[in-house]
Amino acid sequence: MLDVNVLIAALLARDGAPARLLLRWLAGDFELIISDKLLSELGRALSYPKLRSRISRDDASAFVELLESAATKAPDPDERKQRSRDAGDDYILALASSTSAVVVSGDRDLLDLRAELPIYSPQEFHSRLDQSTP
């Protein structure tokens, strides 16, 4: 599961690790899990003036449509327990847990949980994919 910050980073830096991960997902190297709440957060973030100046409304809409049509949509889990310092991140952890997915994020609050949970930075996950590809 790619956190919203990774999805946005992929749009902002098309040659960075997040963008390369999106290309790998499109190539079938891994399954991307999304949910209504994740898409809602992404849409809200993409409408911020700071991002709107760098990502056009059309590009943002096309990106969300791509995710909706090609990613695996999972239901948002009902149960969430406090695991992250930022309670707003707990839905990501609950979604990952309910779908047996790993979390890929650039968020320090989530990355600090790596010792307990399968959470990777974009570069770390890219490296893991490289190791599992024959």
Image (tube, grey):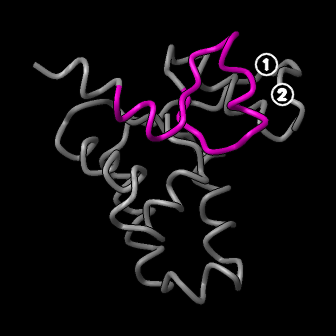
Q: Quadrant of residue 11?
A: bottom left
Residue in the picture at 31% in, 51% down: 20
Q: In the image as oriented, which residue stretches furthest toward the left? A: 134
- Image coordinates for residue 110, horizontal then vertical, percent: 72, 32
Q: Quadrant of residue 15?
A: bottom left
Q: CA distance from mark 1 to mark 2?
A: 15 Å
| Amino acid at the residue labelled 1 | Glu
Q: In the image as oriented, which residue stretches furthest toward the top? A: 116
Could you tell whether 3 is left or right of 116 in the image? left
Give the mark, 1 or 2, whose residue is nearer the N terminus. Answer: 1
Could you tell whether 90 is left or right of 86 in the image? left
Q: Which residues are magenta?
A: 103-127
Residue in the picture at 53% in, 35% down: 104
Could you tell whether 101 is left or right of 86 in the image? left
Q: Which residue is mark 1?
A: 79
Which residue is nearer to you in this view: 105 or 101? Answer: 105
- Image coordinates for residue 2, horizontal then vertical, percent: 50, 41
Could you tell whether 8 is left or right of 25 in the image? right
Q: Is residue 130 above or below residue 81?
A: below
Q: Residues within 10 Å of mark 1 (few under 14, many from 20)?
A: few
Residue in the picture at 24% in, 28% down: 130
Q: Which residue is mark 2?
A: 84
Q: Secondary structure at mark 2?
A: loop
Q: Quadrant of residue 29?
A: top left
Q: Residues within 10 Å of mark 2 (few under 14, many from 20)?
A: some
Query: Is there CB contact under 8 Å for labels 1 and 2?
Result: no
Which residue is nearer to you in this view: 77 or 14? Answer: 14
| Res 12 label | none
Residue in the picture at 29% in, 30% down: 30
Q: Is residue 72 above or below residue 39?
A: above
- Image coordinates for residue 100, horizontal then vertical, percent: 51, 13
